[in-house]
Image: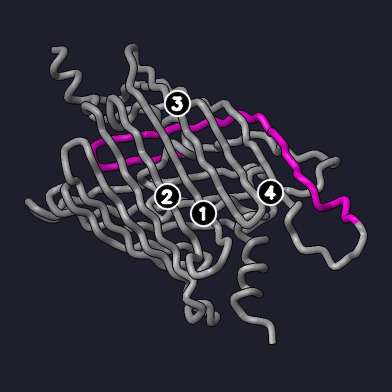
Amino acid sequence: MINKKVIFFWFMSFISFGQQESFLANFTYQMSLINPAYAGSEAQNMISLTSRNQWVSLENSPRTQVMTFSSERKNNVGLGLSVISNNFFVERNTASYVDFSYKLNLTSTAALFLGLKAGATFYKANLVGLTSFSSSTDPAQGLFTNVNPNLGIGMLVRTPSFWFSFSTPRLFNSRNSSEYAISSTDRVHTYIGSGFSFTLNDSFKLKPNLLLRTVSDLSTTADLLTLVSFKDRIDFGASFRTNNTFGLVSYFSLKNFLDVGYAYESPFGNGLSGLSIKTHELALRFKLQNGIEAEEVEE
């Protein structure tokens, strides 16, 4: 009898990577990955690193590494760099983009950021080592590479207690009829997100966040992340994704310049929760002199 894990692994590979791109449980740490308007909006200089190991109990399971850098420059300009690498079985998909943003002050506490993203996705599939049931040489077993340049846009509205984001990190469907396959990064994704920060008392805040992801001809996916913050030093809460995924998320501010985040995800419903396919996600964020503090120093 065929192992249920093998069936699930094979089937989910087409759903998660062939149609929609995977995304992070603690997405608020890496918003510049999907929205270039975030470049320079949160700190004068900030580096965020995330490592996501999905379905860790399965061999050759998907792994994702993310690095984003953003810098607040003069004249309301922000610059950034975003890189995401997805490794799955024999496939490797790396997207590298440069981000630019411009800040418009709406009020003394509210600002509008407009962003532009430019770069490319690098796709590689090594099929040489796959087992073949034919005694003759299979021409499909080779090394395939592809480079797809693209552009993206985004906007962000931010106040001390609210944010709203709209972005399309890749404006163009880069697949053409001559290509042998379509990956998730070939499709145009649109993201709409928002979040609030409610002060409960002197020590606690409630931070609900919602991120919607739409892809043409596919159903919309929603990520809900709700956190309780203790003195802006420790955040803990839960996440839910509408593909039947539940997670626990935590953040710790170890220093004024260093944040650490951890997320644990597991599917539920339809018997999937019994397969022990868990996901672990670790994030680090380095803030090198807050942009607001820098302005106060200059004054």
Q: Which residues are magenta?
A: 137-165
Residue holding disc 3: 114
Which residue is most to the right?
136
Distance from disc 1 to disc 3, alpha carbons, whole Å, reads: 31 Å
Kindly identify the amino acid type of the residue bearing the numbered disc 3.
Leu
Left or right of residue 226, residue 101 in this image: right
Kindly identify the amino acid type of the residue bearing the numbered disc 1.
Arg
In the rendered image of this protein, does residue 8 appear above or below residue 181?
below
**Does the magenta run of residues contain 160?**
yes
- Give residue 106's position: percent from left, percent from top: 32, 25
Colour style of the rendered protein structure: one colour
Q: Which residue is pictured at 49% across the width and 70% down the height?
A: 57
Kindly identify the amino acid type of the residue bearing the numbered disc 4.
Ser
Residue holding disc 1: 63
Instruction: Verify CB contact (< 8 Å) between mark 1 and mark 3.
Output: no
Left or right of residue 111, residue 115 in this image: right
Residue holding disc 4: 183
- Give residue 167's position: percent from left, percent from top: 51, 37
Q: Provide the secondary structure element on which disc 4 rests.
A: loop
Residue holding disc 2: 51
Left or right of residue 207, residue 18 in this image: right
Q: Quadrant of residue 266?
A: bottom left
Left or right of residue 215, residue 192 in this image: left
